[in-house]
Image: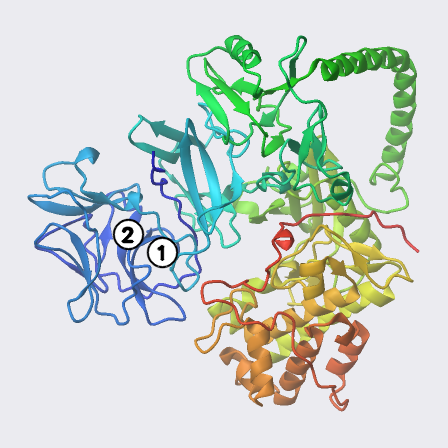
């Protein structure tokens, strides 16, 4: 059976609409009416609007659907590959009963091209966001001749709605499962099969706000996220890096709240531990061979290259004594070589699996009721899930010898547990007494941090300060969780970073940030007021920054104009001095590893403060460079040697600073930069302009009247020196500060920047060619010790 079309997976964008709202708010268009530029259809409940829009940096025009509440969020585009080159498009119903889009010369550039003939056709925009073509007197979905839900649109509209590299789909192979594909065929991530309640191991089940729905009758299928309340809207998006997000919009708000994202962690990356391996979140090692299996290549496994996976120690041969080991709370293997028996009980499934010498494992296909999966051959993409509300299990077939070893080990463990329980209780009691006294004495962090003078707040205090984490106090959110504004009982305003238990930032990153910020004191580093560690709650309490982050200003057209040249130059110097302190003047030599505009906070006077030290690393005095197989940070700011080879040093942060400097001057993002004459990044564009003696063209137009040419030219040259391809060519931060502050100093000539390779027109990151570098905030953290 061919894969059915996916249900409405669309995306956010940074699209700026140039629309004149002349609509009469009708939701239906008949054959006697057309829609031209400036006219729209609006769904009956005023949730969605259809019309023409153009993007910020292009004169092209597109026909699309967007949310009425957030017009910048376009969810569907008709003419993705055939944009209108002027503002004279017309949408109408043809004599053949088709929806057609005409250009200025009345040529058809897009049509519905349906096979069903309608006698009296009308087009209607529904409150679901679905544009349908139907008979005038029939609203039955079975009578639609065409619907936009059957043609999922572009995944992210960053000034170009043409198709991207990633697709998200559900594939029905016995039971449906979600898959994210790259280039149409390479699996990036997948869910487990639909288990009657959710997609196992991938998408959450029902919450108090939304629930996933899947319907399949053997012929037609759809998947949706349904809200329990009429004043909420949801959408599922897919981003340029292949990650999918489910977001929620409350009526009256313009802020989309993140409910879920996937891949959520490293273990969601498809087959990351290879065949017959199991991926474990927040554990070391991340990958383990299943019971009864061993690495195919121990040498590769020892080098943390686990893609080859594992093989059985003893082959299965249907001998007497073979049985099963239960693996609880796991995402079931991919449906590659399997069979589904919808009416078979779990016990019957076990019996049938034992009868077949090739059956490697079995499981319940539904969490409630009958249904049996059997797998044959390798088991691929198994993930351990530590969640109280997840109870799906896999029964792994093992030879008698392996089962005997498991039983023997269990008996030994019972004996050891009984013998050690009394002494264990004494040890725990003594330790808890010491910790409790220390906490009561210092009100600081427990467990070895009594040398840090940092207040420890209880959960109730933080909850009161933030009005119980109310939506009105929410400042923002990210992969770590959410940030809330709060006011302590002393009257001090704070920002509370509440780490989600599902966050990629785990206990190590939390402790790393606490230790670092508590020990580092500088006017250009964010101040840590205290923290909260209670149960599963982990919260960092910072000084409140009323002007948010740097990207809030420089990448917004209106707010950018409020940052005159002198202010921008002062921000550049402040960041440089903060980095110089981290690298040379503090008692800890720190590499930030995630320096970017969103991690530069601005106080009430717009003074910059470097924040978010969860991924930072400490260098000892004699360290020059380190190497890691786990890449952290954000593409667009990473140095080439780090992004490709995992090598990082203080020069890695110098590269990131150079990117920041050029972004501050130009108000353009390095990643995703677009230019009509070439396909370089912002770094490449700056290099081309400087090489041709036209460096001043990089300056953002909003500061053209206020910038000092000699300073601006010096900043551009320093920025290019910082982003040179090879680390040894880049200056130290002490040299950077000196060059920025002293205009009489002659600057060296920069060499070619990193990533100076033209990308393909459809990709903003084509230079990142090493697939193993394409990771998401992977972390290897060494807890720092002061020198």
Vertical arrangement, residue 404 with respect to residue 533, above or below: above
Between residues 304 and 357, which one lies in front from this camera angle?
357
Instruction: Mark 2: give few (<14), some (14-19) or many (20+) Cα within 10 Å.
Output: many
Q: Looking at the image, can residue 563 be seen?
A: no
Residue 740 is tagged as none
Between residues 607 and 324, which one lies in front from this camera angle?
324
Marks 2 and 1 sit apart, C-alpha to C-alpha, by 8 Å
Vertical arrangement, residue 279 with respect to residue 732, above or below: above
Q: Which corner quadrant holds the C terminus?
A: bottom right
Does dot 2 land on a helix, a strand or a loop? strand
> Pointer 1: what residue?
71
The location of residue 254, given as percent across then percent down, is 43, 51
**Residue at the spot 54% in from the left edge and 9% down from the top edge:** 351
Vertical arrangement, residue 398 with respect to residue 654, above or below: above
On screen, residue 92 versus residue 258, left or right, reads: left
Instruction: Mark 1: give few (<14), some (14-19) or many (20+) Cα within 10 Å.
Output: some
- Mark 2 or mark 1: name the one nearer the start of the chain: 2
The location of residue 37, given as percent across then percent down, is 23, 65
Vertical arrangement, residue 306 with respect to residue 423, above or below: below
Q: Quadrant of residue 756?
A: bottom right
**Residue at the spot 62% in from the left edge and 69% down from the top edge:** 755
Between residues 170 and 509, which one lies in front from this camera angle?
170
The location of residue 553, given as percent across then percent down, is 55, 66
**Residue at the spot 27% in from the left edge and 42% down from the top edge:** 45
Does dot 1 land on a helix, a strand or a loop? loop
> Pointer 2: what residue?
49
Between residues 526 and 393, which one lies in front from this camera angle?
393
The location of residue 551, given as percent across then percent down, is 57, 63
| C-beta proximity under 8 Å, tags 2 and 1 | yes
């Amino acid at each position: 059976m061919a894969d059915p079309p996916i249900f409405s997976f669309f995306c956010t964008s940074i699209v700026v609409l140039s629309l004149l709202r002349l609509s009469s708010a009708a939701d239906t268009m008949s054959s006697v009416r057309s829609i031209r530029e400036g006219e729209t259809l609006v769904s009956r409940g005023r949730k969605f609007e259809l019309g023409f829009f153009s993007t910020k940096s292009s004169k092209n025009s597109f026909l699309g659907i967007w949310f009425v509440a957030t017009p910048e969020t376009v969810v569907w585009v008709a003419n993705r590959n055939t944009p209108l080159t002027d503002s004279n498009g017309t949408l109408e119903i043809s004599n053949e009963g088709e929806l057609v889009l005409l250009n200025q010369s009345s040529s058809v550039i897009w049509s519905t091209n349906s096979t069903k003939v309608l006698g009296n056709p009308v087009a209607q925009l529904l409150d679901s966001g679905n544009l349908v073509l139907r008979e005038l007197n029939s609203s039955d979905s079975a009578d639609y001749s065409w619907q936009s839900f059957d043609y999922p649109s572009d995944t992210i509209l960053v000034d170009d709605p043409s198709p991207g590299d990633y697709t998200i789909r559900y594939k029905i192979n016995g039971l449906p499962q979600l898959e994210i594909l790259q280039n149409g065929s390479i699996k990036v991530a997948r869910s487990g099969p639909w288990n009657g309640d959710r997609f196992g191991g991938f998408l959450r089940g029902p919450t108090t706000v939304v629930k996933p729905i899947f319907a399949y009758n053997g012929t037609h299928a759809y998947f949706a996220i349904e809200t329990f309340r009429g004043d909420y809207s949801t959408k599922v998006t897919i981003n340029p890096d292949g990650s999918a997000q489910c977001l929620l919009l409350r009526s009256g708000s313009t802020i989309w709240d993140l409910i879920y994202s996937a891949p959520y962690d490293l273990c969601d990356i498809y087959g990351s531990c290879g065949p017959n391996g199991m991926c474990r979140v927040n554990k070391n090692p991340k990958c383990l061979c299943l019971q009864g299996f061993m690495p195919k290549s121990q040498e590769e496994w020892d080098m943390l290259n686990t893609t080859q996976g594992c093989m059985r120690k003893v082959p299965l041969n249907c001998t007497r004594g073979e049985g099963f080991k239960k693996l609880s709370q796991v995402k079931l293997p991919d449906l590659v070589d399997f069979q589904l028996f919808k009416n078979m009980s779990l016990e019957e499934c076990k019996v049938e699996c034992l009868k077949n010498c090739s059956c490697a494992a079995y499981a319940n296909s539904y969490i409630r009721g009958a249904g049996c999966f059997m797998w044959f051959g390798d088991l691929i993409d198994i993930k351990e899930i530590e969640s109280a509300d997840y109870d799906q299990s896999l029964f792994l077939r093992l030879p008698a010898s392996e089962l005997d070893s498991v039983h023997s080990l269990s008996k030994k463990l019972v004996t050891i547990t009984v013998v050690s329980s009394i002494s264990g209780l004494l040890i725990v009691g003594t330790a808890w007494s010491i910790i409790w006294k220390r906490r009561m004495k210092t009100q600081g962090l427990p467990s070895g941090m009594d040398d840090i003078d940092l207040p420890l707040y209880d959960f109730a205090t933080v909850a009161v300060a933030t009005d119980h984490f109310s939506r009105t106090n929410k400042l923002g959110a990210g992969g770590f969780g959410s940030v809330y504004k709060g006011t302590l009982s002393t009257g001090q305003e704070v920002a509370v970073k509440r780490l989600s238990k599902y966050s990629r930032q785990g206990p190590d990153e939390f402790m790393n940030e606490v230790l670092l910020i508590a020990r580092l004191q500088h006017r250009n580093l964010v101040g840590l007021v205290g923290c909260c560690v209670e149960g599963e709650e982990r919260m960092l309490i910072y000084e409140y920054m009323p002007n948010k982050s740097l990207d809030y200003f420089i990448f917004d057209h209106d707010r950018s104009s409020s940052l005159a040249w002198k202010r921008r130059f002062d921000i550049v110097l402040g960041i440089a001095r903060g980095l110089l302190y981290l690298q040379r003047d503090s008692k800890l030599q720190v590499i930030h590893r995630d320096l970017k505009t969103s991690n530069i906070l601005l106080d009430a006077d717009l003074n910059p403060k470097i924040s978010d030290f969860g991924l930072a690393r400490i260098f000892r005095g004699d360290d020059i460079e380190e190497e890691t197989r786990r890449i952290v940070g954000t593409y667009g700011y990473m140095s080439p040697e780090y992004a490709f080879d995992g090598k990082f040093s203080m020069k890695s942060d110098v590269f990131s600073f150079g990117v920041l400097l050029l972004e501050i001057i130009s108000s353009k993002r390095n990643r995703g930069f677009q230019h009509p004459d070439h396909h370089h990044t912002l770094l490449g564009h700056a290099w081309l302009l400087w090489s041709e003696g036209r460096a001043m063209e990089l300056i953002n137009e909003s500061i053209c009247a206020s910038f000092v040419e000699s300073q601006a030219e010096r900043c551009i040259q320093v920025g290019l020196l910082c982003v040179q391809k090879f680390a040894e060519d880049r200056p130290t931060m002490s040299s950077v500060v000196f060059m920025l502050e002293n205009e009489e100093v002659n600057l060296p000539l920069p060499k070619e920047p990193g990533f100076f390779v033209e990308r393909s027109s459809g990709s903003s990151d084509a230079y990142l060619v090493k697939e193993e570098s394409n990771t998401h905030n992977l972390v290897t953290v060494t807890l720092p010790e002061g020198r």
